[in-house]
Image: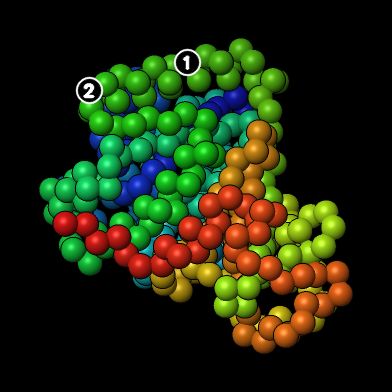
Amino acid sequence: MSDGRGIFFMVVGPPGAGKNTLMNDALRRLPWLKHLATCTTRSPRPGELEAGEYHFVSMPRFRQMIADDELLEWQEVHPGRYYGVPRMAVERRLAAGEMLIADLDVLGATCLQILYPVNSVLLFVEPPSPQELKQRMQRRGDREADIQSRIRRVHMEMQYATLADEVIVNDDLVTSCDRLREILEERRKRRRLNRERVSQRRFFARLLVMDGERALLRTGSDSLPWRPLRAPQALHQAALQCLADLPWNAQGCLHNPLGHAGSFVPPTLVEARGPELHLTWVFRLDDAPGDAPAGWRWTSLQDPELPAGLAQQLHITEPLLLS
């Protein structure tokens, strides 16, 4: 959307991976880098200040911002906790040529990649292990219930490493901080010199319809119905539009790998195929016909036409309990 020369560095990854520590080190050392404060309905943690990392707003105010189209994207990241990116702050600062950085949720970052294909750089921070991830959240004082809610997201969020422009495995803080600064400096130079060569990725939502362990595939080409992803539409809404391809009015619900009915349902599988990014949602049927409709066939999750890894992701529905 923006035709300014600014860059939006979006730092993503599982909670506790060290995103803020790395980002704050870069902000201290790189005077040209500016932080973008996002909006949240959660309460400030000890030491957090208004308009530092976040604008802390009430739920009624957040709803009003949605109604007034003040947010580029928003979602319920954890049950009852909403996050969003302010529209005007991004548009004005990118147009002014600023280099912005923010810690974002992976689903929100995907929306912004679609909106700003030429101005966005996705940086994925990966923890060395799930066990280390839990220990980091415990050390910073997170409640056990919040830790389990976040651990549940790890399986889904780790899939998004395939979407990233750069991946940093944060197993050594000093090395990771140095690496992030190198990436920021290099990307800033590359974007200013070769911006016209930046390839625009294409994002697609696909839908797999299931009845129990049976999967419904279309015969012929494009066995899974698909739609292009268009922000600021909620990503899963594009997948639900694929239900229009079915020959009957299907009733059911989307599979949610997070295990809660949030406002935004993450995909069950994320795949990168060169410049194309495929996000697959699974729709669980309530009224499946015994025989497959014309042009479709029932099959198993082991069918070679299904995306690799989908069956495994479907069975990850419980929190990851780490000792």
Can residue 41 be seen here? The reply is no
Q: Secondary structure at mark 1?
A: helix
Where is mark 1, residue-wise?
186
User: Element type at marker 2?
Assistant: helix
* Residue drawn at 37 percent across, 36 percent down: 125
| Nearest-to-viewer mark from 1 and 2 | 2
Local crowd at mark 2 within 10 Å, few (<14), some, or many (≥20)? few
Colour convention: rainbow
Residue 123 in the image: x percent, y percent? 45, 33
Which quarter of the figure has residue 170? Answer: top left
The answer to whether residue 226 is above or below residue 186 is: below
Q: Are marks 1 and 2 in contact (CB under 8 Å)?
A: no
Q: How many marks?
A: 2
Residue 255 location in percent, x, y?
Answer: 53, 70
- In this picture, residue 285 sits left or right of residue 182: right
Residue 88 higher or lower than 321, as above or below = above
Instruction: Classify 10 Å Cα crowding around label 1: few (below 14), some (14-19), many (20 and above).
Output: few
Q: Is residue 211 above or below residue 30?
A: below
Question: Could you say where residue 29 lies in the image, as x and y percent from the top left?
Answer: 29, 20
Along the viewing direction, whichever of 62 and 273 lies nearer the viewer: 273
Residue behind mark 2: 174
- What amino acid is at disc 2? Val
Q: Is residue 245 left or right of residue 284?
A: right
Q: Give whichever of 82, 64 is nearer the camera.
A: 82
Q: Earlier in the sequence, mark 1 or mark 2?
A: 2
Amino acid marked by disc 1: Glu
In the image, 299 versus 93, the foreground residue is 299
From the viewer's side, name the closer residue of 193 and 182. 182
On-image quarter of the C terminus = bottom left
Q: What residue lies at 52% left-to-right and 39% top-to-bottom? A: 162
The correct choice, above or below, for 173 with respect to 140 in the image is above
